[in-house]
Image: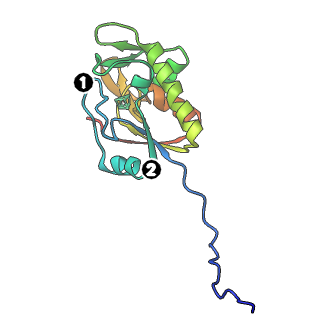
Amino acid sequence: MLAFCAIRCPVSEPQDPPEPPVLVSACLAGRPCRYDGTPSPDPEVVRMVAEGRAVAICPEEAGGLPTPRPPAELSGGDGLAALEGRARVVRFDGTDVTDAFVRGAAAAVELAVARGCHKAMLRAHSPSCGVSASYQDGELRPGPGVAAAALAREGLQLSESGGE
Ligand code: SF4
């Protein structure tokens, strides 16, 4: 005797491809990676990372700098100028750390490309991550930090959070 299966196989609806993750500053995600060893958590960024909607990087650590570390600022221009060799990043004790900042910016771009990120949420005012302004020659001036400039040059859409 023949038996017929009466179960209808479920037909799955076509699904939109998942959104690529947002690249975020690790300190906004709660990592204590700021120069003084503290985090700068943004609750929405923390949630995005926990839900797999964001990937975090600290460009200064990725460039080889330790935490904690002496604070640093841009000198002679913004982060784009530093990428192009027209400005430097200098610690408050006078040490030139431009190469580490540029390496960290390259690492952030590499991660963004590897994960298909189109957007980044970065910490405001940082000489690495600041988007609209960064510390330059002792004051907050318009212009991005080094990693933000590199990510913008790569075509990512940037926004920022935090800052003091
Ligand atoms: S602002 Fe950027 S470089 Fe500075 S601690 Fe946060 S993630 Fe690291």
Question: Which of the two residues, 147 or 68, is positioned nearer the viewer here?
Answer: 68
**Mark 1 — residue?**
36
Q: What secondary structure is marked by label 2?
A: loop
Q: In percent of the image, x 30 and y 45: which residue is there?
A: 42
Q: Is residue 118 left or right of residue 42?
A: right
Q: Is residue 8 left or right of residue 103?
A: right
Count all numbered tags in the image, as a single digit. 2
**Mark 2 — residue?**
52
Indicate whether 89 appears above or below 24: above
| Quarter of the image where one finds residue 2 | bottom right
The spot of residue 152 in percent (x, y) is 53, 35
The spot of residue 104 in percent (x, y) is 47, 23
Ligand 1 location (quadrant): top left
| Quadrant of the rendering where the C terminus is positioned | top left
Question: Which of the two residues, 72 or 61, is positioned nearer the viewer here?
Answer: 61
Q: Amino acid at mark 1?
A: Asp
Badge nearest the viewer, 1 or 2 = 2
Q: In percent of the image, x 55 and y 40: which residue is there?
A: 156
Indicate whether 132 appears above or below 81: below
Q: In percent of the image, x 45 and y 16: which residue is there?
A: 100
Tell me how the rendering is colored.
rainbow
Q: In percent of the image, x 37 and y 12: which residue is there?
A: 90
Indicate whether 89 appears above or below 153: above
Indicate whether 147 appears above or below 90: below
